[in-house]
Amino acid sequence: MRALVLSSACLALVACGGDRGKAGDDDAPAAGPPTNAASAPGVTATPPPPPPAGADEAGLTADDEKLATGQFYDAFPLPIETAGDEISIEVKAQGFKPVLVILDRNQEKLSETEPLGANPDGSWTISFRDRFEEAGEHFVLIAAAEVGQTGAYSTSVQRWRSLD
């Protein structure tokens, strides 16, 4: 699997919700799962494996990679096979407020979503649904909204293929 090194500026952008822009270093490979380059320039870390189709249970731990701003995150590829495919992602987190970030195949941030508020049981839920105009490997980052937050989360991914 090829590695992609995101610049520190991108990692801060992802955590802080800045303007959409190119996320990778100019000399970084063009594809592969995002990794944190903030701790040692030019060094990549191996991200967690992608979740299986359907649902996955995972968690953010103190052993996970950190954004440049200090929040723990997980990253996995989101292959878009056909332009026009629609994807729905739901993240339910316990113990931390999650942030869901979608990067396109060019490492540009397409979306950043946070829950509006906590659920009655104290968990947090994010629902994302969008049509992808370009095929190719995209990326999903699930991060904690605050530094030091960890906890369990589950994801559910559904796909609808465009008939056009």
Image (cartoon, rainbow, N blue to C red):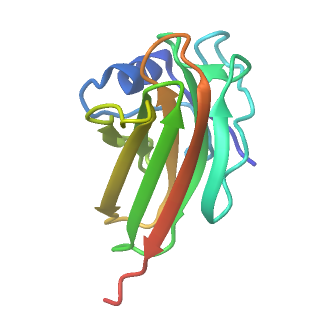
Q: How many marks?
A: 0
Of all residues, the one furthest to the bottom in this rendering is 163
Relative to 52, does residue 126 appear above or below in the rendering? above
Of all residues, the one furthest to the front in this rendering is 120
Q: Pick the residue in front: 69 or 119.
A: 119
Q: Pick the residue in front: 157 or 66.
A: 157
Residue at the (73%, 27%) spot, across then down: 45
**Is residue 31 in sight in this rendering?**
no
Residue at the (27%, 23%) spot, across then down: 18
Residue 82 image position (x, y, % from top left)? 44, 76
Residue at the (27%, 34%) spot, across then down: 20
**Is residue 34 in sight in this rendering?**
yes
Locate the C terminus and report the quarter of the image it occupies: bottom left
Relative to 40, does residue 125 appear above or below in the rendering? below
Residue at the (33%, 34%) spot, across then down: 114
Residue 113 image position (x, y, % from top left)? 32, 39
Residue 117 image position (x, y, % from top left)? 29, 32
Instruction: Tell me if 19 is positioned left or right of 22 in this view.
Output: left
Residue 153 image position (x, y, % from top left)? 58, 39
Q: Pick the residue in front: 142 or 10.
A: 142
Instruction: Tell me if 25 is positioned left or right of 145 in this view.
Output: right
Relative to 132, does residue 93 appear above or below in the rendering? above
Relative to 55, does residue 6 appear above or below in the rendering? above
Q: Pick the residue in front: 96 or 9.
A: 96
